[in-house]
Amino acid sequence: MATTTAPWATEKPTALLVLADGTVIEGRGLGATGSAVAEVCFNTALTGYEEILTDPSYAGQIVTFTFPHIGNVGTNDEDIEDLHPAARAGAVGAIFKANVTDPSNYRAAGHLDQWLKRRGIVALSGIDTRALTVLIREKGMPNAVIAHAPDGVFDIEDLKRQAAAWSGLIGLDLAKEVTSGQSSVWRETPWIWNEGYGEQGEPSMHVVAVDYGVKRNILRLLAGLGAKVTVVPAKTGAEEILAMQPDGIFLSNGPGDPEATGEYAVPVIQNLLKTDIPVFGICLGHQMLALALGGRTEKMHQGHHGANHPVKDHTTGKVEIVSMNHGFAVDADSLPEGVEETHVSLFDGSNCGIALTGRPVFSVQHHPEASPGPQDSHYLFRRFVNLIRERRGEDALAER
């Protein structure tokens, strides 16, 4: 008796990543439906996908996760990093190796797929993320379109045209898209296991944070050290900031091309530097400070994205493992006399920190708030607070 064999079954792709050079990568769609055009980068962190995807510094980018199992611990409302979740600032797309499984963690409040849908993030799984990472490493971060259609119907030629036509991040000011609409005061303090986030009591100092796309955990760490933190929009003028009588000024992280944001941010910072008020910058804030001091920034080949980057602090001689997220960098050779390079990447030697000689002004490229990532660089917040305390004649806190 003859036997029949079922035909070979193939799964119809429901998501595509279409690169600007015409390359089409097929996968399984999840998250929001539709499409988004952006730059593709890779992130090497093993944990913290929710914090990564809600970091406003990822605006205009699609994140490829090199760790294969993303989504296993679910999602919750505590781990988001953008200041205004309704605005959904952060990555527009995400790429995973394995399918997202049901959550298995005591803090989980929801499934990653549903969370991605609510955030409007288009996602794709089931591809060789190692191969895509190698492509980015060798050819640089490509412009691309990520698309998700549950019925698997795509106009591939139109997606190719969209990817090829997008101008990319160079010259793009994204800080204005993710910044706060108005000033606000932040009082939440860092998370404590089994307790959650705290509420600040009586503050001992006042810090004005210029919001280019600030992360919540930065504000929590400042509040936890006794600072009343007033968050102001990116285009707030120097006179308005100084009228708030701050003890310190913080320049936040953020997305896009620093030179584009610098068109309005640099003159403000230059005026703030005419005072003796301590200034601390992180990520885009670091780049803004460097530009204000006469330095230059440049687009990186593959960027730095992950929670395992070694950085040397020349001020202590120690090496710390840090969280990174940037596609532009300060050109160390462009720094003028009187600006000291304080931190350097041990991966590629790129600049990761500067300080103004003899002045209470410094910044770092990496993310010392460590959300996600190791906490090796938390001391930088105490260093900033100590500059404020020194100006007021108070004893310094131990940095570590």
Image: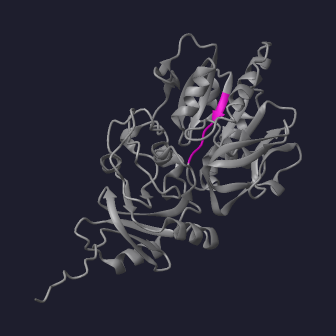
| 355 horizontally vs 228: left or right | right
Along the line of sight, the residue nearer the viewer: 238 or 78: 78
Verify whether residue 253 appears in magenta: yes
Which of the 4 quarters of the picture holds residue 228?
top right
Percent x, y of residue 117:
31, 50
Percent x, y of residue 382:
71, 25
Along the line of sight, the residue nearer the viewer: 265 or 396: 396
Residue 167 can be seen, yes or no: no
Residue that appears at 48% across and 38% down: 81
Percent x, y of residue 252:
60, 39
Q: Quadrant where the N terminus lies?
A: bottom left
Along the line of sight, the residue nearer the viewer: 86 or 136: 136
Vertical side of 28 occupied by 49: above or below: above
Vertical side of 375 occupied by 68: above or below: below
| 246 horizontally vs 391: left or right | left
Magenta extent = 249-254
Residue 308 can be seen, yes or no: yes
Residue that appears at 41% across and 59% down: 98
Percent x, y of residue 298:
70, 60
| 87 horizontally vs 339: left or right | left
Vertical side of 5 occupied by 228: above or below: above
Residue that appears at 58% across and 22% down: 223
Q: Quadrant where the C terminus lies?
A: top right
Verify whether residue 158 appears in magenta: no
Residue that appears at 31% across and 71% down: 13
Along the line of sight, the residue nearer the viewer: 296 or 111: 111
Which of the 4 quarters of the picture holds residue 281?
top right
